[in-house]
């Protein structure tokens, strides 16, 4: 992530934390990350993983897209890149992303907030995706939807995969 994006993410993260009246220690502990790492991130330093950003969004009780909305460049690590395309303003909250998985990628994603669902439409390549033990194989044009409130994975073979990813969060109060 470039310096401007890191700085933007850091300021946004800090304001969300402060709006809730949380200390650095409280959020770091809840998200399972070191306080020093959270402090560096809020200062616009460091190199946060996608999982770290997800854990922070879950603890702040905001959609991942809300946390990364101010960032215009793709976020990525270990062969996976994601970019927020749009974020709905209705209930339930719906976020849409462009996603790319490089060849020979295995991405193990942590569980999202309770009641969250993902829908994937493969644009190009080959992809195996879904919850552990219940994955689906997709070819271009295929769509799959699955519960994302449990660990899930994305796996490619010899070619990369480009997809549209839609995340639908549970309505407030539905899975509190």
Image (tube, rainbow, N blue to C red):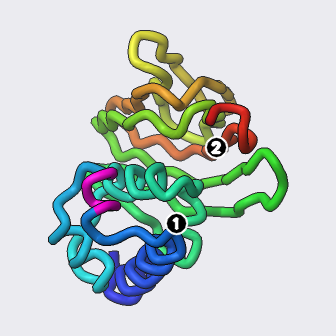
* Viewer-nearest residue: 172 or 99: 172
Is-magenta flag for residue 17? Answer: no
Residue reaching furthest to the front: 21
* Viewer-nearest residue: 30 or 76: 30
The secondary structure type at the circle numbered 1 is: helix
Residue under label 1, please give it: 67
* Viewer-nearest residue: 136 or 57: 57
Q: In the image, is residue 12 above or below residue 65? A: below
Residue under label 2, please give it: 167
Residue 176 occupies quadrant: top right
Residue 43 occupies quadrant: bottom left
Alpha-carbon neighbours of circle 1 within 10 Å: few (<14), some, or many (≥20)? many
Which tag, 2 or 1, sits closer to the chain's start? 1
Residue shown at the point (52%, 30%) measured from the top left: 149
* Viewer-nearest residue: 82 or 95: 95
Q: Does residue 117 appear anywhere in the picture?
A: no
The nearer-to-camera label among 2 and 1 is 1
Across and down, in percent, residue 71 comes to: 51, 76
Q: Quadrant of the N terminus?
A: bottom left
Across and down, in percent, residue 156 comes to: 38, 32
Q: Which residues are drawn in magenta? A: 26-30
């Amino acid at each position: 992530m470039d310096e401007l994006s890191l700085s933007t993410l850091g300021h946004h993260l800090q304001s969300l934390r402060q709006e809730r009246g949380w200390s650095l220690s409280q959020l770091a502990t809840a998200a399972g990350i070191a306080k020093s790492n959270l402090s560096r991130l809020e200062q616009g330093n460091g190199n946060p993983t996608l999982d770290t950003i997800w854990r922070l969004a879950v603890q702040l009780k905001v959609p991942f897209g809300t946390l990364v909305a101010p960032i215009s460049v793709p976020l990525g690590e270990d062969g996976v890149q994601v970019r927020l395309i749009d974020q709905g303003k209705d209930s339930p909250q719906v976020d849409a992303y462009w996603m790319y998985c490089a060849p020979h990628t295995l991405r193990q994603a942590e569980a999202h907030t309770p009641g969250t669902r993902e829908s994937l439409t493969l644009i190009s390549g080959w992809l195996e995706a879904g919850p552990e033990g219940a994955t689906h194989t997709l070819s271009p044009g295929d769509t799959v939807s699955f519960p994302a409130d449990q660990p899930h994975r994305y796996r490619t073979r010899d070619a990369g995969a480009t997809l549209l990813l839609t995340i639908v969060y549970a309505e407030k109060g539905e899975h509190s």
